[in-house]
Amino acid sequence: MANYSRCFACFLLAAQIIYWMSINGALGTKIRGLEGEIAILTKQNEDLQKTIPAKGQAQPAAAGIAYENKDYGFGLQFPLTWKGYMWSKRTVGWGSFGSSPSYDFGFAAQDSIFNIAVLTHEQWNKLSASDEGANPVYLGENSQYVFAYSQSQYSANDFTTARRDEIKNIIATFSIK
């Protein structure tokens, strides 16, 4: 009977050792797997950090949505928050200075959060020297046209308010092709 008790005790001890080894082995495998995932995520985070512009830098073009106007040869970069934006062309009247094409940018809730006017040099010279109404802000020019922008005076909702706050950064990407 004593031999049986010792055998049984040895058996229980061996079973416990095997049990703990299997748990530790499984946990060790899980830990090693998690360490691998952490290393991958750390690398992805480091790569992502390289794409984030430093404070004060413009957002890189690859991180946004490109707009190119082939009729007048200008372009803009929109942040990804502008996904699904709309644009439309209209004619804007400048009173005694005539009219010009203008491109509105917005969303369904507010179709013109800001616009870019395409003016002749003569129109721009007269308009910029005038005190009539609110004048658009100069963006740039080529041999044929002067480009200027203005933004809406109101926002339809919180979403368009947030997009209005991004106009300065969008305008900073304006380029003449």
Image (cartoon, grey):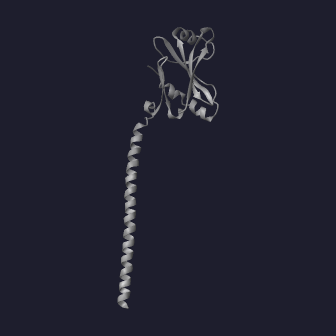
Viewer-proximal residue among 157 and 106: 106
Q: Picture coordinates of residue 166 (x, y %)?
A: 54, 30
Res. 153 image quadrant: top right
Q: Does residue 174 appear in this view?
A: no
Q: Picture coordinates of residue 137 (x, y %)?
A: 54, 19
The residue under the point 51% across, 17% down is 147
The residue under the point 51% across, 25% down is 171
37 in relation to 116, above or below: below
The residue under the point 38% across, 84% down is 8
Q: Does residue 106 appear in this view?
A: yes
Res. 48 image quadrant: top left
Q: Quadrant of the C terminus?
A: top left
Viewer-proximal residue among 141 and 92: 92
Res. 165 image quadrant: top right
> From the viewer's perspective, is 127 left or right of 141?
right
82 in relation to 16, above or below: above
Q: Picture coordinates of residue 176 (x, y %)?
A: 45, 19
171 in relation to 13, above or below: above
Q: Quadrant of the N terminus?
A: bottom left
Q: Picture coordinates of residue 141 (x, y %)?
A: 48, 15
